[in-house]
Amino acid sequence: MKHYLSSLCFLFLFFLSANLQAQTTANYDKEVEALLAKMTIEEKVGQMVQLDLLTVAIPGKSPIQLDIPKLREALVTYKISSFINNGLGRALSLDEWRYVNKTIQDIIMKETPRKIPLLYGIDAIHGTTFTLEATLFPQSIALGATRNPELVHRAAEITAMETRASGHRWNFSPVLDVARQPLWARLPESYGEDPYLVSILGAAAIRGMQGKDLGAPTAVAACMKHFMAYSFPFNGKDRSPALMPEYYLREYFLPPFRAAVKAGARTLMVNSGEVNGVPLHGNKYLLTTVLRGELGFQGIIVSDYGDIIRLHTWQGIAETPKEAVRVAVDAGLDMSMVPTDYSFNTLLTELVKEGKVAEKRIDESVRRILKLKYETGLFKNPYLEKEALKNFGKPEYRQTALDAANEVMTLLKNTDNTLPLAKDRKVLVVGPGANSITTLNGCWSYTWQGNEPQWYPKNALTIAGAVREKIGAAQVTYRQGVDFSGKAIDVDQAVADAQNVDVVLLCLGEDAYAETPGDINELDLPVGQQELAKKLYATGKTVILVLTEGRGRIIREIEPQAKGILLAYWPGIEGARAIANVIFGDVNPSGKLPYTYTQHSGNLLTYDRKLTNKLNEISAPGEFKIDTFGPQYEFGYGLSYTTFDFKNLKLSAPTLKGSGKILVSIEVTNTGKREGKEVVELYSHDLFASLTQPLRRLRAFKKINLKPGETSTVGFEITKDDLAFVNGVNQTVTEPGDFEIIIGQLKANVRYAE
Ligand code: BGC
């Protein structure tokens, strides 16, 4: 009975809230329609324009100063809708942001007839990038290693609060590009190489950022990007062409966007590149038929930086700039990140007046934009909210950044349990990463490239600083050895210093970079860095390798002699403390690789390869060896200071029928001496199918914490959707037949029958 009453109560609340939601939407619809009815074509087109703030800022001023006549031109003459600040070159203080916000909104409120507030969009990619003293979390690729959606959710909530406190209500995040090209310079912005992993963590970030109410002073609208297949450039270079059949596109690159639409993402940014010869900015099939039609996306589609005009200037699918605008709007774009002129205003206005773009079509875009402005509360209060400001820079945010960085740490090697080190060891901290704050944070860190240390908080520690804090400065020597390019700085002194310590912490990797400036021609770690390692090995001292890098640079030559290898990725503002925590045993590492760590540049496979990717015909014709995959380390790999045993993999039934479900369970025991976290990953393998299938693909994961000796039974519910794949005619199907369920080294078979 009690149960019955609570169900009734639940139903009542459900209808009430559904009704409330419906009412809110309906109210905005009415207001949007009323406003739209009054707007001129120029005003409507202006709502579709986004400019870089540098267009209206006086160059080189500190504190920032806006050029008022230019700002008036943007807001009053051209009625533009939105600013971004990709090109400003540095982060601003909260006071500077308050000035920017007030100056802009004042002009709109006092000098424009409709008083449509400006929506400021910004890249807060791993924390609030463009505000001084904001909290920076590990990059997404690092968060991928945590396999922890709650952590991603919390980091996104804090990012939203600090972004809103800076006066911005729109964040160009998360990146949902699946990292399947190891060379790609934006790999660090992705959650990993597996579409399921990216879907789960991407959706968690969106929910965290947007909260329950976009109008709340804690929330920002998310922007899923970059739609789509941006992360699979054929030659590994940023913004270059991708080539793939549609089934592959749907199998590996569409799922995170589908999950993001379900999670309620309000906006989407388009891939700057092209797929199968069609630039995404002109791709009506993908933007309108697939994204709007199939996925049901109703939010704003924004271009990437300057990419509409590039349909003409770079990609040559439009004969004139005007044709480029027509093609993009026809394909489905709602807003142009122009970024620094009024060409889009002029050209689109002309196109509407000439009847080449229907006014009805631009009304659709303007509706979406106005709706988001209502939803984010801008019409109620366009100014930086006092309530929002209270949420900036709380001490607990740095604690979350540290918790996240601790979980990121991925221990790849630990010969003879060399790690953790005792705290009485004398240590040489050496290498280009040893005293660098920028290699801990990477791209989008107070600047676009993230490589200018002067903008970082003064209290942010480098690895050398964190090791000193951990074991006392007297035990620590620091040398750079070489720079990130491998150029020698003080190699001889470094080698001499190594003689006087117990252990060498060799910090190698990549300095910060973003987008095309991060393009590389070799995946190998620069030769000079590897030479430094070899010279230090030659001293006979114990060498531990600490890698801070955006993508997995090849370390094949220097891997064998390292006694320990810790992959820290770009772990954020508290990353150095997390590294020291793991090295000296205050934290038990639990990170798992979010990508396949490449061993040979001629073998760039992802973990979900096929049997035929691995076959190698050896000495005699017809004799095959299955060993040619050979990554340095596999996706999902990562050691702990304790050990875990997996046993008793069980299925609740041998056959999965129709739309039923089966339960998969496994017992996991901590068989070591330390408490530790373990990720239980469930993979499936479709044994016979109409298209060749990967040997395994991730279908579910759970992270658990176990005390020494403790056992936990981990359960997963599997339906036919969890065994599906995209077939040769681009449908997502589960074909009847046998499947392997794989957890750890254990396998069990299940049969699916319709
Ligand atoms: C990047 C986007 C970013 C935009 C605005 C572009 O260069 O590709 O990811 O959101 O700039 O800063």
Image (tube, rainbow, N blue to C red):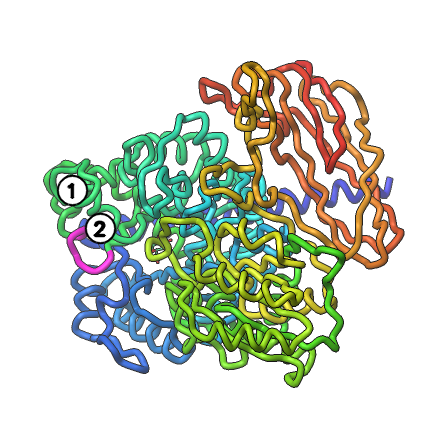
Q: Nearer the viewer, residue 398 or 347?
A: 398
> Magenta stretch: residue 414 in it?
no
Q: Is residue 436 left or right of residue 330?
A: right
Kind of residue sitting beneath label 2: Val
Q: What is the secondary structure assignment of the residue under circle 1? A: helix
Q: Which residues are magenta?
A: 339-345
Name the foreground residue: 557 vs 729. 557
Identify the disc placed on residue 145: none
Q: Earlier in the sequence, mark 2 or mark 1?
A: 2
Q: Quadrant of residue 489?
A: bottom left
Q: Residues within 10 Å of mark 2 (few under 14, many from 20)?
A: many
Q: For mark 1, what is the residue?
A: 352
Ligand 1 shows up in the quarter that is bottom left
Q: Are marks 2 and 1 in contact (CB under 8 Å)?
A: yes
To which residue does mark 2 refer?
45
Q: Reply yes or no: does residue 344 show up in magenta.
A: yes
> Where is residue 94 drawn, in percent x and y?
42, 77
| Cα gap from disc 2 to disc 1, whole angstroms | 9 Å
- Whole-percent x, y for residue 427 in the image: 65, 75
Q: Position of residue 93 (x, y in %)?
A: 41, 78
> Is residue 76 something one can see in this rendering?
yes
